[in-house]
Image (cartoon, grey):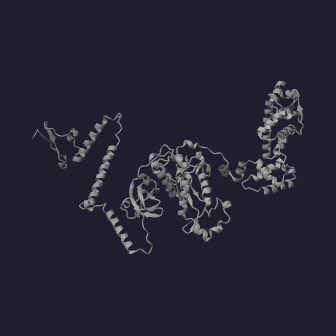
Amino acid sequence: MKYLTVKQAAEKLKLNEGHIRRLCASGDLLGAARKGKSWQIPVSAHPDLRGALAPAVKDDPEELLKVPLPKRQQATERLGLLKQMEKYIGGYLNHGGNRTDAIACFADMQGCSVRSLTRWSKRYREQGILGLVDARGGRTDDDSISPEAWDIFKDMWLDQRRLSVPTCYKNLVYLNHSQQQNWQLPSERNMYRLIHERIPMPAQVLHREGMEAYNAKCAPYIITDREAIEPGSVWIGDHHQCNCWVRNQGRWIRPWLTAWEDMRSRALVGYCVTASPNQSTIMLAFRKGCQDYGPPESVKIDNGKDYDSQMWTGTTKKQRQKKRGKVLDDQQCQAIIGLYAMMNIDVSFSIPYHPQSKAIERFFDSFDRQLIKSFDTYCGKGTHAKPDTLNDYLKTDKAIAAADDLESFAAKVDRYLKVYNSQPHSANKGQTPASVMSTRQSRRVIADGTMDLLLQVWSGELTIGKNGVKFEGNWYGQFNPELLRRQGQKVRVSYDPDDITEVRVFTKDFEFITTATQHELEQYGKVHQSSLREAMKQKRKAAKDMKSYRKTTRIANMRLSDLTIEAAEHAAQLTEQDQQQRTPQPPTIKPVQTPLDNAVTDVKRKEQQQQLRKAVGADTVSAIDLDLDSLTQPVSSSENSFSFNLSALEPNEEPTIRLFENGQ
């Protein structure tokens, strides 16, 4: 290691000598040692001093990359320890102590030996940071790889086809040989180490397993402040298939757990164990939670068809996609109302294929570890975790005899969940879910009786037919008079999942109509006489009920044909009057004066005289100059008048005129 004097270091660092001495005394120039009244400063003490280093002594980044990551981290920690030691020594010397005692005190404080600190300090002065690398276990030339070869290997291995390391390595060796690249290649065994050291785990997951796996395992997600949420206000719901086998109806099945979890307290508020999940099991679990804790203000649900069904949201997913971006009026909103809206519950959907968006997934993991693994029929989360002897065990009589059925399994789950709610939870900082739930300030309630009506399985809009209402493949209310009167109308039905023998029928606006019982089907070709008589009796009763809507006595004495014609005539008159009322007013008349306006009277007079001559057969007789227009005027009682009858004249007979006075 080359050393510099204070003056040489000051020139290279462009500082005055006094400042350099203070840096040496404080330990800021690592490795600086006092020799008499002066200081010896190693060129490794500062990056700007390394121009004097021989090429073999410089810190080479390429060489550092060849060092395994754990050893590089260890060397960096040792360098930091040496810097602390030099600062401690500088302060110790300022108080009159010596370097040897300072190193001994520092070693005792750090819990390491003086010999190790001295050796590391010497190696750092001579070799730089490479001197602090632990040489035990040694590295060979087989550890290094040419950059181009590494890039090709990395691109082959980081592929969703998931080629194995041996396959990629053989391909790389072949390329090196066939193309005469003269690459430096490590052994196949060391390729695993290079992958671990040089390729981050998130990059491995993204390129080999895909974006979905990356989002699930490595992608950061929004961390919500759960403490700002009031207990009982937000519920999370989901299905989970248990990783064990139970007996149900003579066969092995994997049961399902439908659960609702409170987001704030992590308490399981409602749950249901069933052979297969559906919207009915969601209803049963939700009803249990509402009965014990009251309905929530908001729910966060899965994107599955059960939680996202028409019964809950009011519309199907396809219908919502069609209406996306459209503004609905009040009537349309009422038509698509679902159970969430009827209970004034806000709904949010979790991110598909993203378990971090549903905190209940963590509960399912705990449920699997703490309970399900204790069953003899545990099958693991996948084929890789499946016990080798499980298939043979399930075929034995012992396994069948000792197995839980669905009912006993549900009882064990119920006991476990009660204990789970009473145990401290890490998310609650040591508090139990039950204790956190008890701190809530308010609780939503629904009026008595309304809860039972709401929390049932609801259908979409159905049409009443001749045999009542068909729902879930069953007919209800075949002879129900309320339904017979409403044939063809749209209705909704609801039923209790625990009892499907009857349903409640409502209008599409949720007005109650009737309770309809399930129709009992008869075996084809084998109808019992009593059943037939009862059916015919109900049929006659239904027909009689329909006949009661018409009373023939009201129109018994009416002649419908005359009534029909008179009604048609009356309707025609009303139509004509209505048309007259609707006739538009004539436009304003604007007279136009012409040169023939005064000739109209003369032409009319002459034509009347000619017609008079032709009528009496005396075209050659001179006509009496009379005012013919006055003949059409009524005779006044106060004036003399005359009259003559032209139609009574014989041919060639002259007319005789008689004059009368008033009253004569």
Of 640 and 385, which appears nearest the observer?
385
Using the image, determine if residue 295 lies above or below residue 385: above
Of 61 and 108, which appears nearest the observer?
108
Query: In the visual, does 417 lie left or right of 599?
Result: right
Q: Visible in this render: residue 625?
A: no
Name the residue rendered at 35%, 67% in the picture: 538
Using the image, determine if residue 146 lies above or below residue 103: below
Query: In the visual, does 611 lie left or right of 441?
Result: left
Query: In the visual, does 265 lie left or right of 36?
Result: left
Q: Visible in this render: residue 44?
A: yes
Query: In the visual, does 493 lie left or right of 224?
Result: left
Residue 251's quadrant in the figure?
bottom right
Quadrant of the image containing the N terminus: top right
Of 423 and 472, which appears nearest the observer?
423
For the image, the number of numbered tags is 0
Q: Position of residue 269 (x, y in %)?
A: 52, 52
Q: Position of residue 550 (x, y in %)?
A: 30, 61
| View extreme (left): residue | 664
Quadrant of the image containing the C terminus: top left
Q: Position of residue 169 (x, y in %)?
A: 81, 55
Of 80 and 16, which appears nearest the observer?
80
Q: Position of residue 491 (x, y in %)?
A: 42, 56
